[in-house]
Amino acid sequence: MSEKKTNSDWNYHPELPLKDTSIFGDLRNPRLIVRWFTKNWLSLSEFILLTMLATTMWLFAYPSVDNAKQFQLDWVIQIWLANFFLVAAVAGGLHWYFYIRRAQQKKLKFDQRDQTRNNRSFLFSDQVKDNVFWSLTSGVAHLTFFQCISWWLMANGHIPRIEVAVAPSWSWLWFFLGFVLIPVWSAFHFYWVHRLLHVPIVYKHVHSLHHKNINIGPWSGIAMHPVEHFLYISSLCIHWLVASHPLHIIFHLVWLGPGAAMSHSGYENLLVKDKRKLALGTFYHQLHHRYFECNYGNQEMPWDRWFGTFHDGSDECTKQTRERRKKMFS
């Protein structure tokens, strides 16, 4: 496998300028939509792995929704423990593989540098320890909070619930379609919450904690200020309005938690015998962590392109982004 390096600021990056890979770029093109669906749902992908992980957690780790009609310490603690293990296993496993074992060395790693130590801007003067702390304390607590509220609401019939076992045929269609739509909704919600977090006063007191991670790693995914955790994970509230199955909520939670660890891995792809086997991080979001006022969303949504905040990796976009940041914080 060969790696092209056309910009010395990076250890690796994909071909630049970045292309528009959004399915919303041209909804009139059925081939684009089929290609997107095939890539994400008919091959080994982040989508499939997170669905399998969510299903495993639903079957073996989380308490039944029917046991959550009253708030009781046993089932709340069970959810907290399951979420703690979930985040620790995924983020910790990726960190071990890429940064301790160094199984890929720096192949497909975007940033040339190792993660920061002896830096007082981080708790314990250590980036990884700082990220672990925020992920396993506030991060797990907020995932648990929103899941427990959702479990209680669903158990008591306060929110619509899909009963697959006795559902009409259309509910089966909605059940499967839900998994496809959750990442789309999550990306929409993330973009607008992210724009709010970059309002200067909010950025200074809240979002700057996450942005200390310029050179990101798996533990950086949900290393956030508690206020940001609340806003970010509030994406789950969509299930309070739209008919859902408990597995939809778990998939959504896994997407927001372990999914963020995968997308912040710092590597574009997992290699097996020098072959790309699993897409992980994106250069699109890596640019955001380095240049801040750009690429607030993700590649599959058009918002950055529509609102003029898209960074395609070129020097010209870097210049424009730096000028925009200077104006915002002047």
Image: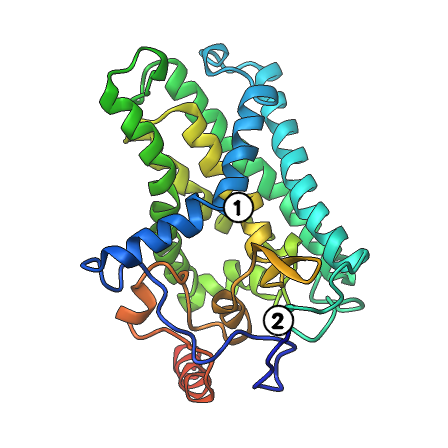
Q: Can you name the residue that lies furthest to the left here? A: 28
**Which image quadrant is residue 217 in?**
bottom right
State the colouring used for the structure image: rainbow
Q: Quarter of the image for the N terminus: give it.
A: bottom right
On the rendered structure, is 202 left or right of 32?
right
List the residue tagged with mark 1. Answer: 44
Give the x, y percent position of residue 12. Answer: 61, 75
Question: Is residue 95 something one can see in this rendering?
Answer: yes
**Which residue is at the front of the view, 127 or 121?**
127
Residue 169: x and y in percent read 25, 20
The disc labelled 1 sits on which kind of residue? Leu
| SS state under label 1 | loop
Residue at 49%, 43% in the rendered image: 255
| Mark 2 element type | loop
Q: Is residue 104 left or right of residue 1?
A: right
Question: Could you tell me residue 206's position as x and y percent?
Answer: 51, 58
* Disc 1/disc 2 C-alpha distance (Å): 22 Å
| Callout count | 2
Which residue is the site of mark 2?
110
Dot 2 amino acid type: Phe
* Disc 2 residue crowd, few under 14, some 14–19, many 20+, Cα 10 Å: many
Residue 249 in the image, given as x and y percentages of width and height: 43, 31
Q: Residue at x 71, y 58 (%)?
A: 273
Label drawn at residue 330 = none
Q: Is residue 106 above or below residue 210?
A: below
